[in-house]
């Protein structure tokens, strides 16, 4: 059996309404394309992406900062407790084949930097943190298709 592709969705815990909308659509697109959403498993962008994926019938891996899964949002289907705090960002970047950025703050920047250091493609939606080496995208669909190795929709 072939392993399913994991796509990381990263972003802030205090997003704008537009960020929440974009993250929800990203999660839906990931699920519609048969891939698995990987995120930090908490609120904000992580929860919106997880909800989109869950509602579209997809799986959601939540890489949690605490010692158990009690902090996971309601849409995480596969919680992984790390007890590592922000250091879990390294696990998210390593686990995903590509990262999609929806807004974010310092934690998101660390995930972007780790992903780039590992040679992972990083796709940034409008309003997201842009570092040298990232690729700007305009829509959730475009972000997911590029993350899966395809061209523009």
Image (spheres, rainbow, N blue to C red):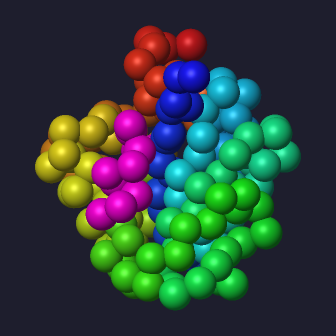
Q: Relative to 21, is 108 on the left or the right?
A: left
Give coordinates of residue 118: x percent, y percent.
Answer: 19, 46
- Does residue 32 appear in the picture of this structure? yes
Residue beneath the point at 79% across and 69% down: 74
x and y percent of residue 56 in the render?
Answer: 81, 38
Give residue 4's quadrant in the image. top right
In the image as oriented, which residue stretches furthest toward the front?
1
**Can you give x and y, in whole percent of width and height, for residue 144 in the image?**
54, 30
Please say whether residue 81 is one of the residues in the magenta stretch. Answer: no
Kindly indicate the quadrant of the structure image that contains residue 25. Answer: top right
In front here: 92 or 80?
A: 80
Q: Quadrant of residue 151?
A: top left
Magenta-tinted stretch: 90-100
Q: Quadrant of the N terminus?
A: top right
Residue 123, placed above or below residue 42: above
Quarter of the rendering occupied by the C terminus: top right
**Is residue 116 rendered to the left or right of residue 11?**
left
Which sits in the foreground, 43 or 37?
37
Is residue 16 visible in this depiction of the protein? no
Q: In terms of depth relative to the viewer, which is nearer, 130 or 54?
A: 54
Relative placement, left or right, of 90 versus 27 is left
Residue shown at 52% from the left, 87% from the top: 67
Q: Nearer the viewer, residue 92 or 3?
A: 3
Q: Residue at x 78, y 49 (%)?
A: 54
């Amino acid at each position: 059996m072939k392993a399913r592709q994991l796509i990381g969705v990263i972003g802030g815990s205090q997003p704008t309404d537009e960020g929440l909308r974009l993250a929800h659509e990203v999660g839906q697109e990931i699920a519609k394309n048969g891939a698995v959403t990987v995120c930090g498993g908490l609120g904000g962008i992580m929860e919106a992406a997880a909800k989109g994926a869950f509602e579209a019938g997809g799986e959601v891996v939540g890489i949690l900062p605490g010692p158990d899964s009690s902090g996971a949002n309601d849409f995480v289907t596969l919680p992984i407790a790390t007890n590592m705090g922000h250091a879990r960002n390294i696990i998210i970047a390593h686990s995903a084949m590509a990262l999609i950025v929806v807004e974010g703050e310092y934690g998101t920047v660390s995930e972007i930097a780790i992903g780039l250091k590992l040679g992972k493609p990083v796709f940034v939606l409008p309003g997201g943190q842009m570092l040298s080496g990232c690729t700007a995208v305009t829509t959730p669909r475009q972000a997911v298709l590029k993350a899966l190795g395809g061209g523009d929709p």
